[in-house]
Amino acid sequence: MKVLFLYSGSRYGVLDKAKKGETHVNGFWGMTYLPLYGIEAEYFEIEQYLPMWLARFVRKTINIYFIHLPFFWKMLSYDIVFTSAAFGTQLFHALLHPKKSLWVMHDFSITGLLGNEKTLRQKLFRFMVSRTAGIVTLSEDEKEKLEKRFPHLKGKVVFIPFGVDLNFFKPQNLPKKRQILTVGFDPDRDWGTLLAAVKDINIHVVLATRMSRVEKYLPLPINVEVTQFSGRDLVKEYDKSAVVIVPLNTSSHNNDAMGCSALFEGMAMGRPVIVTRTKTIESYVNNKENGLLVKEGSVADMKEAINFVLDNTARAEDIGKNAYEYAIRNLDAKKCTAVLADFFKKIYKESRG
């Protein structure tokens, strides 16, 4: 069996760095591990076929949903296409509905994009989802909602975390600092709530993001630093931080699964993680057992959770330990990929009768 992965962003050069131990393979959603389970897997992107200057130009001018469309016919040589964002190409696939190549959706918020299914865009999206061969969700709640909306897909929708690279993200036993670390580059991080919560707390705060993400909050509180880290340095930063915070803003309804990567990494590092409560996050975190859940947009909730961690260090370390044990049991990317491989084999076999 051959599986093709399509990503919205470029992964150019990442695999080479991973082989050297310089970074992790979390963002490949299991692709690198599938060969362990008898499945040939690869990805392609425009950077593999175009000069870098031209690839950059294309990415700036063409919507990411259509970026793979020129390579559609190449996709037909694969048994399964697995992707979360190539919706323009998926529409073309749904219209043609080729028998050989199955389309499987990696779901970050399908129900959010479906909305009330009244607009033309939402109706087209429903058509695309209805023609898919299978869906991998990141929460039990999303799985249940999709099976209710698409009864014919029951048994073809499965909840599988994409997991975390435990060989890369593992405790280093470095001396701990009175420091908050928060990591995230997507536009749905709730920087406003976090910054309002920490401005009066005596603690150093590290935002591992681009300055452009927080520009509208300038000037930042004096205890806040904005920076970026290499893969190895990020591991060290996780390890020495007193607490990891994942502040989320779901108001766009485009991605209920945001924040999972940072959550999984923090848990794998054995740190107490404070995270905004969402339906997806609730699939992984039990409040004050293996993490701390806070109400979206609540400065008071966020501040209370931070002070709880700082004032109850023994309890916080227990929460971090529980998070680490949870990650070992449930978030090992290799184990998650084994479940994904079984799912691919199942739907492929069923499609062949």
Image (cartoon, rainbow, N blue to C red):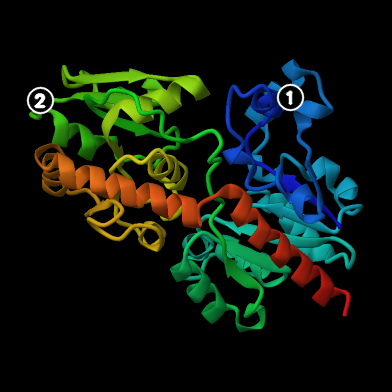
Q: Could you say whether the residue bearing mark 2 is in a helix, strand or loop?
A: loop
- x then y, percent, for residue 322: 33, 52
Write down the quadrant of residue 206 in the picture.
top left
Identity of the amino acid at label 2? Asn
Q: Nearer the viewer, residue 59 or 223?
A: 223
Q: Marks 2/1: CA distance? A: 46 Å
Q: Which mark is residue 92?
A: none
Identity of the amino acid at label 1? Ala
9 is higher (above) or lower (below) than 77:
above
Q: Nearer the viewer, residue 69 or 308?
A: 308
Q: Quadrant of the C terminus?
A: bottom right
Judged left or right of residue 340, residue 222 is: left
Judged left or right of residue 233, residue 123 is: right
Instruction: Name the residue: 44% across, 45% down.
Output: 264
* Residue that label 2 marks: 202
User: How many numbered marks are there?
Assistant: 2
Q: Quadrant of the N terminus?
A: bottom right
Local crowd at mark 2 within 10 Å, few (<14), some, or many (≥20)? few
Farthest bottom residue in view = 151
Residue 302 at least partly seen: no
Judged left or right of residue 268, residue 311 is: left
Residue 194 at least partly seen: yes
Q: Nearer the viewer, mark 2 or mark 1?
A: 2
Q: Nearer the viewer, residue 128 or 318?
A: 318
* Residue that label 1 marks: 55
- x then y, percent, for residue 122: 56, 64
Judged left or right of residue 25, residue 353 is: right
First in sequence: mark 2 or mark 1? 1
